[in-house]
């Protein structure tokens, strides 16, 4: 390798090395220029002194502009004043590509301008930090699930039927077969796979034609669905809590620099590694009514309601056992109360909103048939799904985690559109 990554500077102090990256910022004071270089791993200061450079190198130092691609050779040195900070004393600078009129200045721009320039906005420190946290969450998720004996299987994106209700389906023409629908969740498919591999999960983009213009809704987002044979509602809750606690621990351990850039209060994140709060839906409604919400039994929680329920909690809050009438057909009916299902929503503190939805699944073919009919779904589309109950159906449970919701909460980002590389919302399809 003829260049090194700046994160490896501590191993190269005193050595002459070459780095490649982009000029993030430049400050000059007479015969000295401070070049802030981003190589994808760190932001590193390269110090160029006119006196120790040949005239043509100094000319390039003066000429190089924001976001030009550069190759710099120099000596790695410890920062004279700051611990654990390293810089490069420049000997040579090559401009690989000279950038002209880069549109994003290092000052505040409005969100619309930044979203139009999302392909460039990704280079900012803030977006870098969010992307890194997103990656850490994915790594932690894969780690924990394998530790708990889940294996990754994948589910299709073109589907013939709805998983999460018909009102948010995106239809696409599909050759001679009519319409296909973009998957809203791979859940039904991984329910089939558990009879092969026991415990499994998928992770991929899902699509919802949601009319909601909120800071928590995307039309394309990444979902991890997990499913386990022989898991009941309690097992399901245990794995969800274990997963979220593991993700938070992992991020605290690996994303210190990212949290600093984002000015995220990590003290509150540290408190998450403790038993989560649990309310039944019924308890939640009582608590909400006592705290000024006019929500009625049988209604879904709004953003404000979620805020009230998590206001005094440092840990995420499970709301479990919801009314059957407002939940999808596949959730298991509570045998002690046929109006209720064995499900849960997990609400993150600090205004994080719902990050997970899960349930024990209905095993009874008869109940499923009745519920599919009641929801007005086309029975023929679900025959394959009913087979999973007809042939060796067992108690089983699972859940779906919305990646960007978790990124939003852990990174402390206000709007979900910054939590995915290229956001898709009702009003945005570009770039
Ligand atoms: P649910 O519909 O609750 O459950 O979705 C699971 C999780 O996905 C996230 N989410 C979203 N994130 C961003 N934008 C959206 N528009 C959006 N909608 C949902 C949330 C939510 O908790 N099949 C079930 C899961 C299961 O039971 O296995 C399902 O899809 O974080």
Image (cartoon, rainbow, N blue to C red):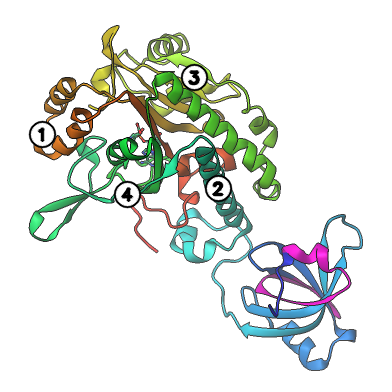
Residue at which label 1 appears:
379
- CB contact under 8 Å: marks 3 and 1: no
From the image, state whether disc 2 or disc 3 is nearer to you. 2
Q: Is residue 54 left or right of residue 289?
A: right
Residue 139's tag is: 2
From the image, state whether disc 2 or disc 4 is nearer to you. 2
Which of the two labelled residues, at mark 3 and mark 4, occupies the earlier sequence position? 3
From the image, state whether disc 4 or disc 1 is nearer to you. 1
The answer to if 150 sits in the magenta stretch is: no
Residue at which label 4 appears:
426
Which of the two labelled residues, at mark 2 and mark 3, occupies the earlier sequence position? 2
Q: Secondary structure at mark 4?
A: loop
Residue 322: which quarter of the image?
top left
From the image, state whether disc 3 or disc 4 is nearer to you. 3
Which of the two labelled residues, at mark 3 and mark 1, occupies the earlier sequence position? 3
The residue carrying pointer 4 sits among few (fewer than 14), some (14 to 19) or many (20 or more) residues within 10 Å by Cα, namely: some
Residue at which label 3 appears:
309
Question: Is residue 53 in sight in this rendering?
Answer: yes
């Amino acid at each position: 390798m003829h260049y090194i990554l700046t994160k490896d500077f501590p191993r190269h102090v005193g050595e002459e090395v070459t780095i490649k990256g982009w000029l993030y910022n430049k400050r000059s004071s007479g015969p000295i220029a401070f070049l802030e270089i981003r190589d994808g791993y760190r932001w590193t200061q390269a110090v160029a002194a006119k006196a120790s450079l040949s005239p043509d190198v100094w000319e390039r130092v003066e000429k190089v502009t924001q976001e030009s691609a550069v190759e710099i050779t120099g000596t790695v040195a410890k920062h004279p004043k700051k611990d654990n900070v390293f810089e490069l004393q420049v000997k040579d600078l090559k401009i690989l590509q000279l950038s002209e009129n880069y549109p994003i200045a290092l000052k505040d721009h409005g969100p619309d301008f930044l979203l139009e320039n999302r392909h460039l906005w990704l280079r900012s420190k803030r977006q870098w930090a969010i992307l890194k946290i997103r990656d850490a969450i994915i790594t932690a998720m894969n780690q924990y699930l394998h530790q708990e004996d889940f294996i990754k299987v994948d589910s299709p994106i073109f589907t013939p039927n709805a998983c999460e209700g018909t009102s948010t389906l995106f239809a696409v023409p599909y050759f001679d077969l009519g319409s296909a629908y973009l998957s809203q969740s791979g859940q039904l498919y991984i329910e089939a796979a558990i009879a092969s591999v026991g415990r499994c999960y998928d992770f991929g983009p899902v699509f919802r034609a949601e009319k909601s213009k909120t800071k928590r809704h995307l039309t394309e987002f990444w979902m991890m669905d997990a499913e386990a044979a022989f898991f009941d509602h309690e097992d399901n809750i245990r794995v969800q809590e274990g997963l979220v606690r593991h993700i938070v621990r992992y991020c605290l351990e690996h994303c210190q620099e990212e949290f600093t850039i984002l000015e995220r209060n990590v003290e509150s994140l540290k408190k998450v590694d403790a038993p989560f709060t649990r309310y039944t839906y019924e308890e939640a409604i009582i608590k909400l009514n006592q705290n000024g919400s006019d929500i009625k039994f049988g209604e879904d929680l709004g953003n404000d309601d979620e805020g009230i329920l998590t206001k005094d909690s440092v840990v995420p809050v499970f709301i479990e056992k919801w009314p059957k009438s407002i939940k999808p057909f596949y959730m298991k009916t509570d045998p002690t109360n046929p109006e209720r299902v064995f499900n849960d929503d997990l609400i993150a503190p600090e205004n994080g909103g719902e990050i997970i939805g899960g349930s024990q699944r209905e095993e009874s073919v008869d109940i499923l048939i009745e519920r599919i009919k009641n929801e007005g779904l086309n029975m023929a589309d679900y025959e394959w799904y009913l087979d999973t109950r007809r042939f060796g159906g067992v108690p089983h449970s699972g859940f779906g985690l919305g990646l960007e919701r978790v990124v939003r909460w852990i990174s402390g980002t206000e709007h979900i559109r910054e939590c995915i590389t290229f956001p898709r919302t009702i009003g945005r399809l570009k770039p």
